[in-house]
Image (spheres, helix red, strand yellow):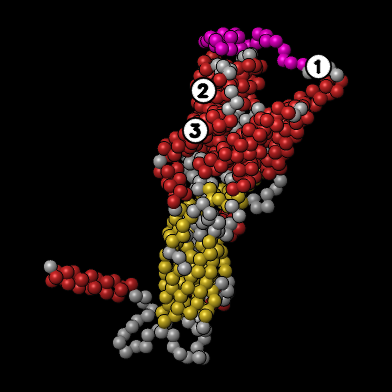
Amino acid sequence: MHHTRRVAFGIALGVSAAMAATAAPAQTPQGPDEIPTERVHSDISTREIAIKSNFTGIEIVIFGAVDYAPPDPKAPPYDVIMVIRGPTQDVVARRKERFAGIWLNGSSKVFHDIPGFYAVLSSRPLRAIAPEETLNELKVGFTALDLGPDDHSSVSDDLFRQAVIRNKEERLLFQYLDNAVSFIGRSLFRGTVDMPVNVPIGVYTAEVLLFQDGKLLSKDESTLNVQKVGFERGVYILAFRHPVIYGLLAVAIALLMGLGAWALFRRD
Amino acid sequence: MLQVYLPIAEISVNLLVILMLGGAVGFLSGMFGVGGGFLLTPFLMFLGIPPAIAVATGANQIVASSVSGALVQWRRGNVDTTMGGVLIVGGLFGSIIGVLLVNLLKSYGQADLTIALGYVTFLGTIGTLMLAESVRALRRERAGKPVKGRRPGEHSWVHGLPFKMRFHRSKLYISAIPVLMIGAVVGILVSVLGVGGGFLMVPAMIYILRMPTSVVIGTSLFQIIFITAAVTMLHAVFNQTIDILLAFLLIIGGVLGGQYGARAGQNLRGEQLRALLAIMVLAVAIRLLLGLVITPSDLYTIAPVETPRW
């Protein structure tokens, strides 16, 4: 009994060690003799956001620290970019056209897999941290979002693309926050972002990228789950998964309340 | 303060504003004996509730208000259930057509426009008619002439149609065809606009079907319960646009407001108030129309992709 358990434990250790080896970022080779390079670790102030009846939006804090920072006072400062991505959805952008004096939806374009929430926080303006190609490669910033084939031949396509970004920005679902990441000392940092009341539900990822001198040193990622809870969750699940029961319930409540009102205020 | 998150509309609204809106509309309907859905739904849209949810939830709210109203009429024996039954059959056809239409329009991004245009047309027409009627009545009153009632019934095109049925309570022997048609038109209105449709049903009963006025209100309310209940079900299944919490809050406000409205209505003189209601209805129509003709600040809008369910 004891013996088998120890074997199982040993296997588990071996597996996790192997996983750690494959998961280790390529840019931080850690040979026995080498001086370890910087590594970034991060986490979010909350792993779960519960949408309840009093939900009006929430501020989340993403914090982290730089490990193996060499004690070199002349080294250039670190820069941090944080990218928070919400669950993706297909979005249709429509252009209003005037017809007989009335503005109605005319031509449209569908964009697939657009993040429902997308925020980029940085310790300095993005361009000052790294060149554009690096940022695009890392999919940082609105221009790096995959908004369909980039054929610059069609002007209207570009207008639709800008419209998606503009609309999302207005609803605070896309945010660019320069200087939203602040360092506490040399290797500790934090960034805050406001999630609005209309945040889509689902799993979010918060990617933290550590830069120095325009080069990516290390990155880390954590996840955040936005869920409706309690009554709101029950209502939502019932409405979308059991719509017949939901409809019957809606009708029954209204019928009973109408009946109750009549019984309460009857004058005969 | 007192913000409450609506689980289906997915916005946070002020609890007191919603209760007051339900109360105000209930007050008006208690005072004037109108359903009030034609005011409730536009005001929900002004508050930022998506139009499709405002419409469907409005229909859900009317289930409650029409039950209370119909029970009062039922106790007085003012409901023609045969007439109501035929209207319901027509109304169910109309509601199915309407709900599928909303579903199709939603996937083309034209639902909001259709709802707004529908409201501009109906509120504009009703408001104008009501205003003209009350101005005429006020003038007559000032001139000292008695306010004229409706003309006695006479034969119309309705009486020449086949499939005649006997409606005992209404003392009528008429074709079922116009009854079904009126039911269907009201069913479409309920499902597309989220109104009870009483403003159309009542005149149609009086002027087209020539029903006795005593059974008109009761029968209209009776059939509206079934039509709004069916529309609530259909919207819940096809469009997922019923916000049960919003409906609950509106019903509470409406019930309380309705009681005060009914009491206030007994002590107040009608014609001036009717003119006031007409002006309010016209103001809402104009506000909705302006939203359609004024050049929007952003010509582009975005929405989640929706595919029709049929």
Q: Label 1: which residue?
A: B146
Mark 1 element type: loop
**In whole angstroms, how far apart are the C-alphas of marks 3 and 2?**
21 Å
Give x and y (percent) for residue B168.
Answer: 55, 10
Q: Is residue A216 above or below residue B206?
A: below
Q: Which residues are magenta?
A: B148-174
Q: In this rendering, do the residues under marks 3 and 1 share a single chain?
A: no
State if disc 2 and disc 3 touch (CB < 8 Å): no
Number of numbered discs visible in the structure rendering: 3
Q: Residue at x 52, y 30 (%)?
A: A259
Q: Tell if the residue under mark 3 belongs to the same chain as the one under mark 2.
A: no
Residue type pointed to by label 3: Leu
Q: Is residue A147 left or right of residue B253?
A: left
Q: Select label 3 or label 2 by which is in front.
A: 3
Q: Chain of mark 2?
A: B
Indicate the amino acid at tag 2.
Ile
Residue B24 visible in rendering: yes
Disc assigned to residue B88: 2
Which numbered circle lies on residue A27?
A: none
Quadrant of residue A87 within the rendered picture: bottom left
Locate the C terminus of chain B and report the quarter of the image it occupies. Answer: top left
User: Residue A256's mark?
Assistant: 3
Question: Numbered disc 1: what chain?
Answer: B
